[in-house]
Amino acid sequence: MRALLQPVYGEADTLTVGDVPIPTPGKGQVLVQVAAASVNAADVFLMRGVPRSVRPGNGLRRPARRRLGLDLAGVVAEVGPGVARWQVGDAVFGQGIATFAEFALAQERHLAALPRGVGPEHAATLPVAGTTAMRAVEVAKVRPGQRIVVTGVAGGVGQFAAQLAALRGAEVIGVCSGRNVERVRAMGIENVLDYEAQDPLDTATPYDAVIDNVGAVRIRDWRRVVARGGAILPNSGVRGPDGGALMRVAKAQWHGLVAPQRVRILYTTFTTERLAELGQLLATERIRPLVDTVFTLEKAPEALATMGTHHARGKVIVTTS
């Protein structure tokens, strides 16, 4: 089968597409014939090996697995021992292992049924970004009437966090570059700030929560504009004014001890229930994905390069056809 290969840590020009054996599912695993996979920031961090906190368990000097990809949508091609939930031919989506390939393995419990009427390219946007966004609105305790700021609103997590918060009845203030303002408004977020022209810190009314997917604002500055008892959720691995990923975690923990707001680092908690709920929201068009570009598998390195700019206008998709 054809697959994206990662021989070393580095930029997208170190990646190649080549032939590898089709994997065999083990106990509790499913082999999926991949129709589409989406690129996440985590894939870029693993490609670069930066921040270095991603290297333990993945190879300190060079990647041990040498394959990338987390999200997928496709059809079950084979089931391993003990798998009862899925059968060959079932259409599924979820999280897998090395999904930038024609076939990929996934744990049985990490898949959900592909809803009728939802294409694999759209379903593949949900597993990491969608479940992270759902976790964000839960941790922020978003309620009707609250003012919620979402930075990076045109990105993967941001687009879904904004839509999910709006579904809960919140007033959502999205923050993105000027070129994305109309795209974000088209998905139903009316209040959108162009960070190149408007400062989200310039507000007369405090926010109830901020879901910060960019890291361009210091946590201490968010504290000035978020109400007491509100939530500040830093969610970026990119270096910013608070430092790199590890420093941002340390500062968030410190602020969490002394701030009158709830400062929480956002950790993804994947569950099949969340994934299935997101799938139904997509099927009923209550959420809609923003897609930047769709690449074929042979051009998967270009997909990683696009995501690596950190300026993709929505999700980046890799298809096998």
Image: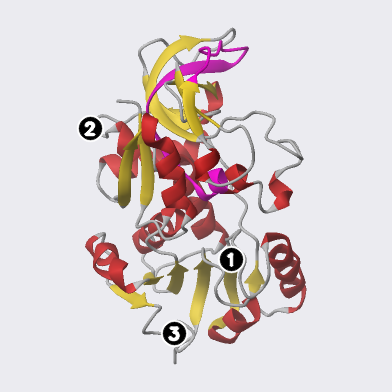
Q: Could you say where residue 311 lies in the image, as x and y percent from the top left?
A: 42, 60
Asked whether 208 or 31 is in front, the reply is 31
The residue type indicated by label 2 comes to Gly
Q: Residue at x 43, y 53 (%)?
A: 156
Disc assigned to residue 199: 3
Sequence-first disc among 1 and 2: 2
Q: Give the structural element (helix, strand or loop) at label 2.
A: loop
- Please check the rendered image and state whether residue 80 is part of the magenta-colored stretch, yes or no: no
Q: Which residue is mark 2?
A: 117
The residue type indicated by label 3 comes to Asp
Report if residue 72 is visible in the image: yes
Q: Which residues are magenta?
A: 19-44
Q: Could you say where residue 161 lies in the image, as x and y percent from the top left?
A: 43, 58
Q: Residue at x 58, y 33 (%)?
A: 6
- Please check the rendered image and state whether residue 43 is part of the magenta-colored stretch, yes or no: yes
Q: Give the structural element (helix, strand or loop) at label 1.
A: strand
Determine the CA span between mark 2 and mark 3. 40 Å
Determine the CA span between mark 1 and mark 2. 34 Å
Q: Which residue is mark 1?
A: 233
User: Vertical placement of 205 versus 250: above or below?
Assistant: below
